[in-house]
Image (cartoon, rainbow, N blue to C red):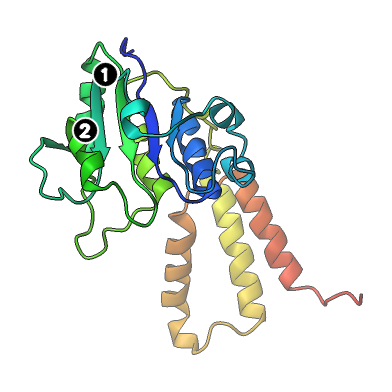
Amino acid sequence: MSAAPPPVIVLVRPQLGENIGKAARAMLNFGLTELRLVAPRDGWPNPDAGPASAGADIVLADATLFDSLADAVADCTTIYATTVRKRGVVKPVLTPEDAAAEVHASPGRSAYIFGAERSGLDSDDVALAHKIVTVPINPQFGSLNLAQAVILLAYEWSKGIALASPPAVPLDPPAPHAELEELIGHFVRDLDKSGYFVPPERTEATLRTLRTALTKTGWSHNDVRMMHGIITSLGRTPRSR
């Protein structure tokens, strides 16, 4: 597990409270809780942030407000500007994975900074940072929203800590082949009764295709029982409602 402090997430001039909430949700999913806001357009607190956060209230409640980016990152030793454009600023450019590795190896506090939804970080914001993080993306469509950008960096950082995985749910064991044979027989009887096997000379090939489809799916006992019920139901006269 990483001994380095978690990075702070800094949103610079975010426009919509809803997007701040979605960014908070992305953070908490991957274990980040410290959110700093620089001059949000609609002020702070914002009533639209809470519903959009889907319960990430701890992140929003502890979010801190700053007038300038310099103030927001004053206690940080390494600052990563997230942008798809280098904007003519000569700085090291990292992938999210490389940046996460650096954050885990750094003894000081690191910050990921994100720009406004429409315009991103401006040149002065990027100039304040030590390094640039750029997400490898389709050059024909380099459009990430704010929460998507946050979740990409948060996820890469989270791979260096011990987050709990969802509990494994065991699959039902496959049904014995005898049960599949009974199911195939049920299909064949009802299909034959309904006149499905036309023309008759194609019956053997059709049966072979049916058998192939039914034996390659890994049906469980419950799956087989359900299919028997479906076939039986389809053969019944509909009940009046």
Q: Position of residue 206 (x, y in %)?
A: 45, 76
Q: Quadrant of residue 230?
A: bottom right
Q: Residue at left 57%, top 45%?
A: 220
Element on which disc 2 rests: loop
Q: Quadrant of residue 172?
A: top right
Marks 2 and 1: in contact by CB < 8 Å? no
Quadrant for the N terminus, please: top left
Which numbered dot is residue 161?
none
Instruction: Identify which amino acid the numbered label 1 is placed on.
Output: His
Q: Which residue is mark 1?
A: 104
- Give the side of residue 184 with respect to residue 204, left or right: right
- Give the side of residue 103 with respect to residue 8, left or right: left
Which numbered dot is residue 129?
2
The image shows residue 207, relative to residue 216, as above or below, that is: below
**Which of these two is toward me, 138 or 75?**
75
Q: Position of residue 108 (x, y in %)?
A: 27, 13
Element on which disc 1 rests: helix
Q: Find the residue positioned furthest to the front.
A: 67
- Asked if residue 219 shows in the view, the reply is no
The image shows residue 118, relative to residue 107, as above or below, that is: below
Q: Find the residue positioned furthest to the bottom.
A: 199
